[in-house]
Image (cartoon, grey):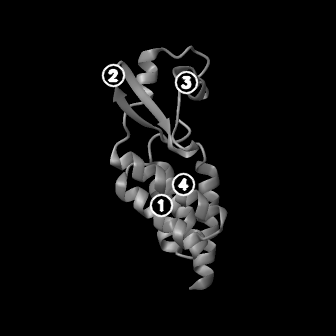
Amino acid sequence: PGHFLVSMPVEGGLLVLDPYHRGRSIDVQELKSRAQPHVGEQDIHDEQLSQLLTPASNRAILTRMLRNLKALYVEQEDWARAVRCADRLLMLDPEQPEELRDRGLLYLRVGHLAACRADLNRYLARVPPPDDAAKIREVLVQSGRDRARLN
């Protein structure tokens, strides 16, 4: 949790390095301290720590990179690039409802109202209904008005 680490087996254990801090090695206590906010109040056992250090798949790495890029583009209000990231995230995993919602809202930002409405309606059709369903319905109503006005 936090960011990617690099690990490699060495005689007598595992060496964990932090590439974001010049490849500094990290001991067990620091690993547990970094993981603590992500596992709750319970003490972290060696088995849990080992699971957290399981190598990430290529798909997981791509997903993480695309989410980071999408957040950066949203922050910069570069809606077209953010939409492309959202689209690629859905190509990697079409079953992510939050990504479907986000892409719909980003389509709204770039003026693709039909695509916006399609994504948001698919998002609302999920079972159980999402917590933000009322807010998304409001967006759909407004985008319908915008679409009618443009026609």
Front residue (pair 72, 50)? 50
Q: Residue at x 57, y 63 (%)?
A: 105
Q: Residue 131: x and y, percent?
A: 59, 42
Q: CA distance from mark 4 to mark 2?
A: 35 Å
Would residue 25 be seen by someone viewing this image from the given angle? Answer: yes
Q: What is the C-alpha distance between the residues marked 1 and 3?
A: 28 Å
> How packed is label 2: few (under 14 Cα within 10 Å), some, or many (20 or more)?
few
Please tell me whether mark 3 sits on a helix, a strand or a loop: helix
- Mark 1 Cα shell of 10 Å, populated few (<14), some (14-19), many (≥20): many
Residue at 40% x, 53% y: name it. Answer: 62
Closer to the N terminus: mark 3 or mark 2?
2
In the rendered structure, which amino acid carries the disc numbered 1? Ala
> Of residues 46 and 81, which is closer to you in this image?
46
Amino acid type of disc 2? Glu
Are circles 1 and 3 on residues that touch, CB within 8 Å? no
Reading the image, the residue beneath label 3 is 39
Q: Earlier in the sequence, mark 3 or mark 4?
A: 3
